[in-house]
Image (cartoon, rainbow, N blue to C red):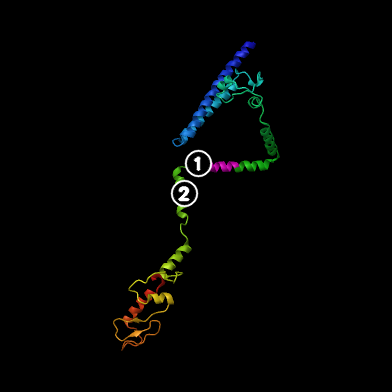
Amino acid sequence: MQQREEKQLEGAVESLTSRVAHVKNSLQSFIYKLENEYERLTWPSVLDNFALLSGQLNTINKLLKNDKTPSFRNQVIIPLLLSPDRDEDLAKLTEQRVPVFSHEIVPDHLRTKPDPDVEEQEKQLNAEAVRIGPDAAQKQIQTLNKLCSNLLEKLNNPREDRDSENAALRQNKPSFNPADTTALVAAVGFGKNLSKCRPPGPVAPGHPGQGNMMSGGPTLQQVTIGGASGHQGNIGGPVASQQTGQPGKMPSSIKTNIKSASASMHPYNR
């Protein structure tokens, strides 16, 4: 009877070791892809790797819950030899992860309970969960369910719908400042807020009197009226004379020269 139980235990351990080796190989392959093939790795491939790992873990759980599998809870592992020296057989068996089986390593590898710090945190969480009333817990559950539903809805929406929504948001978002636009139009059209000082440098030929106008401020110079002999006047003052027979009407030649002089005095033309 005892020999039969020992054989069952050995067979269960070998089967469990084989299943765990499959999980280890799958994890190593997946980690290698994540570290070296992440540029070519697609989301369906990632899901396939997760599905493979999930299936292998479910197989191990079924193996442990099988009636023919002996209960590992009743088995006790006792270290027979502890040594600070390197054990080559142990290093080979554990793929160089555990080269020494000493007093420092044994508590971690043969632990049957969580780490004391983790156990203390778990107790605090359980105590906090007990303090929360049913109404507060129900509100938190509803809030979490709402957030999960919104997230699932966004993930399930087609990509075209998300692109159209983003495009609509970009179109509705203003891309200019109305105040800056108004100031720019006023500066271009009316010379508002433009500097009245000419930059240093020689005066361009063909512009008589420009230097005086720039340095002396907005004073107008005398302009010779072309096309009307004997008629000169200061543009800043009243017209000296008018055409005969047309009282109260300014000659067209004077209007033309006044317009040209005014255009040269515009701040935008400086």
Q: Position of residue 207 (x, y in %)?
A: 34, 74
Q: Which residue is mark 1?
A: 155
Position above or below: 93 against 217? above
Q: Residues within 10 Å of mark 2 (few under 14, many from 20)?
A: few
Q: Answer left or right for 173 relative to 254.
A: right
Q: Quadrant of the N terminus?
A: top right
Position above or below: 104 against 155? above
Name the residue at 51% across, 27% down.
Answer: 26
- Residue 232 quadrant: bottom left
Q: Helix, strand, or loop for circle 2?
A: helix
Magenta highlight on residue 53: no
Q: Position of residue 201 (x, y in %)?
A: 39, 69
Q: Magenta stretch?
A: 144-156
First reached walking from the N terminus: tag 1 or tag 2: 1
Name the residue at 51% across, 42% down.
Answer: 153
> Magenta segment, principal secondary structure?
helix
Q: Answer left or right for 41 relative to 149.
A: left
